[in-house]
Amino acid sequence: MEFLGYITLAIFLGLMLLTLFGYIRTPVQTVLVLSTILCLIVGGLFRFTAYGWNSVALMPNEFLGGIILHPITALLTGLFLAGGLKASGGFEALKAILGYLRRSPIGLVGTLVILINLPVISSLPCGRILAAALLPLLFTFGFEGGLGILTKSQLIVLIGAFTRNSMGSCGPSPIGGVGQIAEGFLGSFFPTASDGILRAPQAFALMLGTAVVALFLKFISQKLYPNDVALREAPAGIATQGGGSEIRIKAPIQGFIALAIFVMSLLIAIFQPLGKMPVQSVLVAGALLMIVVCRIRLNDLLEGIILLPVTAMAAGFLAAGALAATGGFVALASILNSLVSIKALGVAGMLAIFVQFQTILPLSCARILTAALVPTLYLFGPAQFNFLSWSQLAIVMAAYIINATTSCGPSPLGGGGMMGEGTMRAETGFIKGAYTFASMAVMAPMAAIFMKFLNLSVFQPSDPGFARNIYMIAAFALVIAGVNITFILLGSRIFNPNVSRNFFVQLLGFLFSGGIGGGILAFALFELDTTKICQGVLGGIIAAALIGLMAPKTLSKRLTATLSGPTP
Amino acid sequence: MTLSDLLHDPVNFFWNALKTRGVRLVAYAIVVASIFPSSRFILLVAVILALGSIWRKEYRFNQNPNIVYLLVFIAFLLIGYIVTFVNVKSVDELRFGMTPWGDGIYQVTDGKYIGEGQGYRGPIKVEVQVKDHKIIGIETLAYPDLISVLDNQIKMFKQGLLARGRLFVPGQPEMLRGSRQTLTGYVNAIQDALSKGIPDFPHYDWFSRTFLSLFIGQAPNRVTLNALAILFAVFMVFEYAFQSMLTPGTGRSINCYNCASCVGVCPVKEVEGVQMPMGLVLLTRLGNYERVMELSKYCVGCGRCAAKCPIGNSGPLVISAAFQAVMEKKRSTSTENKRDTA
């Protein structure tokens, strides 16, 4: 059976890698279903030979048992609600509110900061929902969009940071977000895990990561790929800083009503003031209320559906179920187990690599691999291998999930980040370095620290431990952000026109930051155990090398080649 | 689609029905209603409201008489409800004097009877054996609820029932989720079984039974509402994907990642509030081909989107498929008109 597991794991990972590197050009869901079928065929033949027909007959139950319906249907109903909001002019209402905020004392910068963090504030089950609605609005802030209040460089930063925040907000989402999959597993020990044990660490890490992405895009990406964004600068003579004529955004009254219904539905779904009920019921009721009150059509709800995350999740669950039924996870766990036996790596080093797995292998929706890998991570805990206690498992889960949820950002397979690249008219891959750097160096260690010192600590506000833990989190946040910002600023200063040299400098930065990130993760898990911290540093460096090497040195000229033929 | 179409060309009639969203939605409602009796009344009301809203508009614009048929149907429902109500009330009064509870067991003749009751998650079925006007055996044939309730509360109740030999009101179950409904359903199933052993036990007439079964089903509860919400989501997404598969050439639009990378390279980018060309792809998913044709005049046909799309979708491809679909629809409409005229 273990041999079968290695075969099916190889099929799964092989197909995923071939898709990621563009050798298979079909939608990733198709590849996942293909992988499921192949795994089942191989598994069926193997079982028939080894154990007989009865063992084969058990397989459908085993692989279908991997499907978790709740996040799929919660995501769907979230999409309906967003569809209703869009059709009734709710997003226009949101734009109008932002317009008022802009004229308030917080001004343009304050409004933009709120705008960038809006996805994590609203925490919808898929980042694409808000991104699809608001990216066109962000585009209007530039010269080409009409408002002309931001320069090209500022617009790149704004769009990139907003997209980063969006493509990660499905982690802390309590209405069908990816984080719920991990919370479900942690629920077998922590009774209130499903109420949102991972939510705060993910949201905090995401906010900090968003800021670092903004800096990376400003100081590194724009220097590394100076000619790969087709946005135009304002022509000379046209002032950009607030000089553009201000366009007042008008929204229909139905839009404001729909926005109110939307917010109320989210609050009821999250806080359950009317007693326990599935989020799906609340969200569908909200969507139907929008149909009646705002006079929208059923078609408008349908328009809100974004099929990719829904089908990716379903296909991911199928693939995960097929792997489970054929021993793929056991094989993966054995491989990782053998990494643990390498003295230089140990458990800390292995985990430092594991939490970065989805940043290394970014697919178009985080749910695909999360559905497959969270059960493996769970096995590292007291459930099987006993590498980690329940608290340590929760810390690793926090670090893993934030990186997993942000992995659709840099994915070239139609990941959410491509929406940002499309809006900023950039070549595919422009944002990859910034996104993977922030996920690896900032978000994973920060989520782990936050989980260790706040979520897993039992304290009262009057307890001196409370203040100490808050100071610890603040100190680590400053250190993590400070070190990485220093690297970004230093790197930007030593960049020169030599592309290869710049890429090498960037890779060096990745390695340093990855090492620090791995060390901090090891500290969060094993505290001041020097050996473990060193192992974590090494694991972090290995993961960073894989991530850094996959960031493009130069960007694809596929489009140019298509239009004007290959250039010599 | 008319009745004569069904008689002359049933295959084409059903194919056209399948391609009509409204018909599909009603079909989903019928499927759900047949599987979940507790959803029937809600779905009936929803379908009537939806059809009423659509046909009222049609009546205003082109005097389409469908709304009149709907009103006749509603009148039939009201009359049927009154007839059923009267019958149910009179039968229930008769039944009150023939209940199998307590000493009423003396009316039950010897034999084995099967009865059904509604539990928390579905129907519970039991077989009750009566001998010498005493319950001597109970077998659970179908039980979908919590096993812990079966092992504890129901087990205790059954022991009490066999000891006394007659049906009695059980004690209040412990606060397990749904245990009260489960126990009540179980008791109702036993009562139903015992009632079958009473000679001349009054029954509702055939009209009331059919009416209750078809249009009312069972009393909806919270579980029904939650199940309906989930089914609504599942059917909607199925419907969304199904539409593009029914129209040749638009199936590829299902694969759209909504990544908007095509929007980035499109020289048009946005017109009439639609992101080009991604909006065209999404409109074909909805089956809104006329809107695609309206917007197609803005597409310059440069094909940049095809080069950028990770799965090879493109605006011109979608427009040509939508054009085919619109032409097909026009052709079939004109054929129908010609036939009607002839």
Image (cartoon, rainbow, N blue to C red):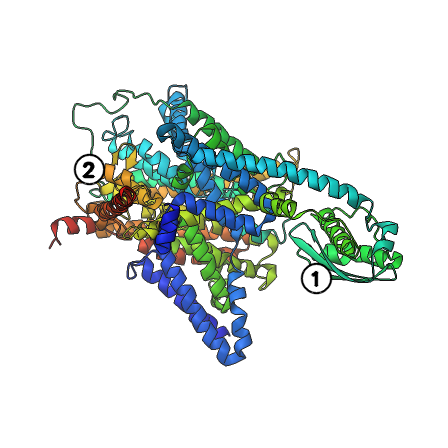
Name the amino acid, label 2.
Lys
Name the amino acid, label 1.
Leu
Q: CA distance from mark 1 to mark 2?
A: 65 Å
- Looking at the rendered image, the quarter that the C terminus of chain A falls into is bottom left
Instruction: Give whichever of A111, A95 is nearer the camera.
Output: A95
The residue where tag 1 is placed is B141
- In the drawing, does residue A284 fall left or right of residue A231? right
Instruction: Give whichever of A313, A83 is nearer the camera.
Output: A83
Q: Is residue A348 above or below residue A457?
A: below
| 10 Å crowding of disc 1: few (<14), some (14-19), many (20+) | few
Instruction: Give whichever of A140, A242 is nearer the camera.
Output: A140
Q: Which mark is residue A52?
A: none
Task: Tell me what residue is drawn at x 38 percent, y 52 percent.
Answer: B7
- Identify the element where label 2 is drawn: helix
Q: Is residue B283 above or below residue A15?
A: above
Residue A125 placement (x, y as % from top left): 46, 43
Q: Quadrant of residue B63?
A: top left
- Identify the element where label 1 is drawn: strand
Evaluate whether residue A447 shows in this view: no
Residue A183 placement (x, y as % from top left): 56, 49
| 10 Å crowding of disc 2: few (<14), some (14-19), many (20+) | few
Q: Looking at the image, is mark 1 or mark 2 earlier in the sequence?
A: 1
Task: Tell me what residue is drawn at x 61 percent, y 44 percent.
Answer: B211
Instruction: Kindly identify which chain the residue marked by label 2 belongs to.
Output: B
Q: Nearer the viewer, mark 1 or mark 2?
A: 1
Residue A347 placement (x, y as % from top left): 51, 61
